[in-house]
């Protein structure tokens, strides 16, 4: 269900990641898309989305800015499970919030993570360290349609996926 899977959670000098008591703390990869601050963003104007690509082990997010990242982990959500993602308190205390929609039953891929600095000061985030926690909820039965059977547009994501409107 999670590859690569890390059993432990705490690592000295790193933002924690791996199996936690009630979920899984996933990591941020070293690939980022950074908004061009002078261009209007429009989810209906695809494929032109003004992002700049970056590959770094540490990235500083200016106050009021949002970037996109992806998880190190590749997830395969079972058909009878839904998952919810939450930001880590370590970053939340600095003004960093992540926004992700529920991860639907049957979805597979690397998570695209929207990371926003709602504070005024620049904040560094670190690749290959924890960025959020996924909490899993098992249903009593499989839904009539899963993300896979609906052929969702973000299925099997292996990179950062920008907004798409059907």
Image (cartoon, grey):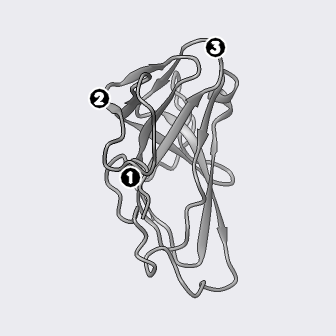
Mark earlier in primary sequence (1, 2): 1
* Residue neighbourhood size for the residue with mark 2, other residues' Cα within 10 Å, grouped as few (<14), some (14–19), many (≥20): few
SS label for mark 2: strand
Instruction: Check the image and report above or below for 72 versus 59.
Output: below
Q: Is the residue under label 2 in contact with that under label 3 (CB below 8 Å)?
A: no
Name the side, left or right, on which 132 lies relative to 1.
Answer: right
Instruction: Check the image and report above or below for 37 versus 80.
Output: above
Q: Which quarter shows the N terminus?
A: bottom left
- Name the spot of residue 162 as percent of width and height, x first: 39, 47
SS label for mark 1: loop
Residue holding disc 3: 120
The extreme top residue here reads 121
Residue at x-position 42% and y-position 38%: 69
- Name the spot of residue 111 as percent of width and height, x first: 45, 51
* Residue neighbourhood size for the residue with mark 1, other residues' Cα within 10 Å, grouped as few (<14), some (14–19), many (≥20): few
Mark earlier in primary sequence (3, 2): 2
Mark earlier in primary sequence (3, 1): 1
SS label for mark 3: loop
Residue holding disc 2: 55
For the residues marked 1 and 2, what is the alpha-carbon distance in whole angstroms?
20 Å
Residue at x-position 37% and y-position 33%: 32
- Name the spot of residue 144 as percent of width and height, x first: 58, 88
Camera-nearest label, 1 or 2: 2
Residue holding disc 1: 4
Q: Which quarter shows the C terminus?
A: bottom left
- Name the spot of residue 40 as percent of width and height, x first: 45, 32
């Amino acid at each position: 269900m999670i590859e690569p899977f890390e059993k432990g959670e705490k690592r000295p000098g790193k933002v924690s990641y791996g199996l936690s008591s009630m979920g899984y703390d996933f990591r941020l990869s070293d690939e980022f898309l950074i908004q061009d601050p002078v261009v209007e963003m429009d989810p209906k104007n695809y494929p032109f989305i003004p992002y700049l690509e970056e590959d770094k082990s540490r990235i500083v997010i200016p106050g009021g800015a949002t970037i996109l990242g992806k998880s190190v982990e590749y997830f395969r959500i079972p058909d009878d499970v839904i998952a919810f993602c939450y930001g880590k308190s370590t970053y939340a205390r600095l003004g960093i919030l992540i926004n992700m929609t529920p991860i639907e039953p049957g979805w597979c891929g690397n998570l695209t993570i929207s990371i926003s600095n709602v504070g005024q000061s620049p904040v560094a985030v670190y690749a290959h360290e924890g960025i959020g926690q996924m909490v899993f909820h098992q249903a009593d039965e499989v839904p009539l349609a899963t993300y896979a059977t609906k052929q969702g547009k973000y299925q099997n994501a292996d990179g950062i996926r920008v907004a798409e409107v059907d």
